[in-house]
């Protein structure tokens, strides 16, 4: 299955932000601090002016996802939305402690837990999400749903097209790159329930921050889940 023309990845080092184009334009995640110029250049390549961005949706408050949110909010004038439980991270600009789920998490944690990689410019979100949130008001055909597990306030974007953007709900395994449990997770039972909630939406293509994308059927075959 080919990736959607409406979901444009912006590769930023070890992570990926996304431009979502429909009648309106939103950004999903913003990379580490200092990523704003690359994202703005990618918008320009897509024929999108900064002021055309209606929403910056943060899947969670870790530095590799929210690091350039303050700068991009200033550059675009867009509203910033995040899960309500992430507000502490965003207001302090700190990722907080990462809880490894296995060996890869312990190894990569040596990189992501460094002071220089775990802090970012703080910001005040405009929209805090606790339940299903409709994106149509921003010109995008889809919804946002809470998918806790990686963090308590993690969010996923479910587009009407069947494309789904999940942040760090799913990682690409190392070294094979297959869909896998995230390297870090605050609550694995909640993560399993979130995977179930995601699969109930019958995703066609799932976009993640570290690897992918994956077809929904591949995720269903490979990942454990339960209600």
Image (cartoon, helix red, strand yellow):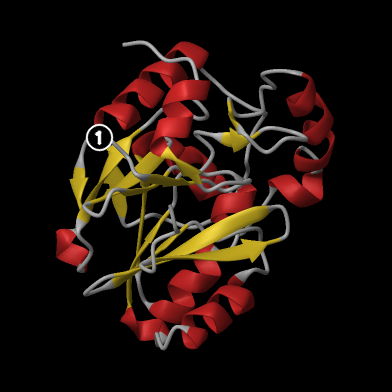
The quarter of the picture where residue 110 lies is top right
Q: Residue furthest front?
A: 1
Residue 227, horizontal then vertical, whole percent = 31, 11
**Vertical side of 174 occupied by 129: above or below:** below
Relative depth, front residue between 143 and 126: 143
| Residue 70 position in % (x across, y down) | 51, 65
Q: Nearer the viewer, residue 137 or 84?
A: 137
* Above or below, 108 relative to 27: above
Residue at the spot x=52%, y=29% of the render? 150
Q: Is residue 206 shown left or right of residue 186? A: left
Please tell me which residue is depicted at 60% across the width and 36% down the height of the picture: 171
Crowd tier of the residue under label 1, counting other residues whose Cα lies within 10 Å: few below 14, some 14–19, many 20 or above: some
Q: Position of residue 14 (x, y in %)?
A: 71, 52
Of residues 163 and 39, the one nearer the viewer is 163
Q: Which residue is mark 1?
A: 201
Q: Please give the count of numbered marks on the rendered protein.
A: 1
Whether residue 69 sits left or right of residue 84 in the image: it is right
Q: Is residue 5 above or below residue 171?
A: below
Q: Residue at x 25, y 34 (%)?
A: 201
Residue ID at (25%, 73%)? 24
Is label 1 in a helix, a strand or a loop? loop
> Is residue 118 placed above or below 28 in the rendered structure?
above
Decide if residue 156 is on the left or right side of residue 121.
left
């Amino acid at each position: 299955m080919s990736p959607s023309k409406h979901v444009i990845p912006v590769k930023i080092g070890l992570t990926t932000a996304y431009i979502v184009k429909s009648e309106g334009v939103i950004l999903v995640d913003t990379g580490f601090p200092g990523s704003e110029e690359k994202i703005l250049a990618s918008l320009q390549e897509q024929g999108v002016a900064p002021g055309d961005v209606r929403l910056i949706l943060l899947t969670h408050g870790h530095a590799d996802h929210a690091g350039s949110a303050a700068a991009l909010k200033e550059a675009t004038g867009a509203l910033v939305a995040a899960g309500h439980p992430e507000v502490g991270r965003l207001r302090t600009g700190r990722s907080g402690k990462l809880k490894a789920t296995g060996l890869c998490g312990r190894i990569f944690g040596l990189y992501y837990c460094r002071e220089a990689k775990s802090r970012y410019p703080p910001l005040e979100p405009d929209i805090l999400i606790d339940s299903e949130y409709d994106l149509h008001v921003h010109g995008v055909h889809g919804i946002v749903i809470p998918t806790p597990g990686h963090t308590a306030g993690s969010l996923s974007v479910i587009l009407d097209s069947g494309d789904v953007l999940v942040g760090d709900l799913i990682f690409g395994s190392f070294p094979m790159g297959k869909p896998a449990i995230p390297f870090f997770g605050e609550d694995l039972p909640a993560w399993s329930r979130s995977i179930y909630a995601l699969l109930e939406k019958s995703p066609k293509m799932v976009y993640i921050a570290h690897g992918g994308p994956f077809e929904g059927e591949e995720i269903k075959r490979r990942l454990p889940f339960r209600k």
